[in-house]
Amino acid sequence: MKRTRKLGYLFKEGIHNMFSHGFMSFAAICVTVACLVIIGSFSMILYNIAVMVRDLEQQNRILVYIDESYNTAEAKSVGSQLNLVENVSQAVFTSRDEAMENFLAQQGGGEEFAGINAETFRDRFVVTLEDNARMAETVEAIRNVKGVADVAARSEIAEGFTTLQRVLNIVSIAIIAVLLVVSLFIISNTVKLAMYDRRDEIGIMKMVGATDRFIRFPYVVEGFLIGLISGAVAFFLEWGIYDLIANRLTAVDSLSLLDIVPFTKVLWIMVATFGAAGLFVGVFGSVMSIRKFLDV
């Protein structure tokens, strides 16, 4: 019971600290919200780009041509061997007739193609990979499969996608790290101002035997509340901004081909991210700033 009253007192002090420095707390919340919204917006942009890159990678398929001497049944049997190759996600068979029909459809027919027949084409497999970064070694393994006559692969495109993804990851980590540091700095300074005003009180508490934990707790609560409020406000603000921009983009005919990920698809991930980031910035910022004032 005594411990409960003690914790209640410390929580009350933390809340009092936040409201007693209302303007600075409000400023800290606003700046932290701005940083978290920028982090969230940039993360969602990168996530959408990553999804688009992944979709483009799926379109960057390998064409595996089967030996002309194989009949249709023998050609189809090669597929079981292709699917056993490491890194192959799927191998879909296309017969000579289907290859001819696809070609004519792409070319729009026309009399100039009247003399083309199915024997002009080869049976083939359209192969998609699990990881396009390993295309070169996978192509080499496919070439060694019995019955494979040739392989057509655009490895330079796969390498371009891989490089783009790495650059995006590096940029995102750098920007998020900078914004987190800015948020930590703002909240740390806010708590420092609160403690500077009460430095004499902290000194007296130390002299009468108050522990560092007892003195520190209210300020940690203050940082916790600032971080929690900032995370909640930033989350709902990000949700509204994202949906607004996504709806505007999909309404533009020239941008209708963009496959924008709905916010609801990553809802709980974003809840956890904003909550964790807000609490981390708030609590850690308070802990960082209080050390100096406890050394009285």
Image (spheres, grey):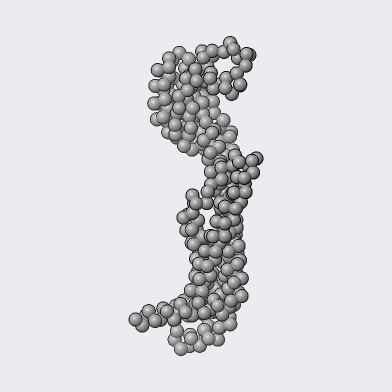
| Front in this rendered view, residue 8 or 64 | 8
| Front in this rendered view, residue 106 or 149 | 106
Q: Give the farthest residue toward the top.
A: 115
Quadrant hosting residue 285 = bottom right
Residue 281 x %, y %: 53, 66
The answer to whether residue 161 is above or below residue 64 is below
Q: Give the farthest residue toward the front.
A: 251
The answer to whether residue 202 is above or below residue 256 is below
Residue 5 x %, y %: 39, 81
Instruction: Determine if residue 143 is in view.
Output: no
Residue 209 x %, y %: 44, 86
| Front in this rendered view, residue 133 or 263 | 263
Instruction: Determine if residue 233 is in view.
Output: yes
Which residue is depicted at the point 48% across and 34% down?
A: 129
Which residue is depicted at the point 62% across and 49% down?
A: 248
The answer to whether residue 163 is above or below residue 90 is below
Which residue is depicted at the point 46% across and 55% down?
A: 268
Query: How many numbered dots are placed on residues in this image?
Result: 0
Which image quadrant: the N terminus?
A: bottom left
Which residue is depicted at the point 61% across and 75% down?
A: 23
| Front in this rendered view, residue 183 or 230 | 230
Residue 101 x %, y %: 53, 19
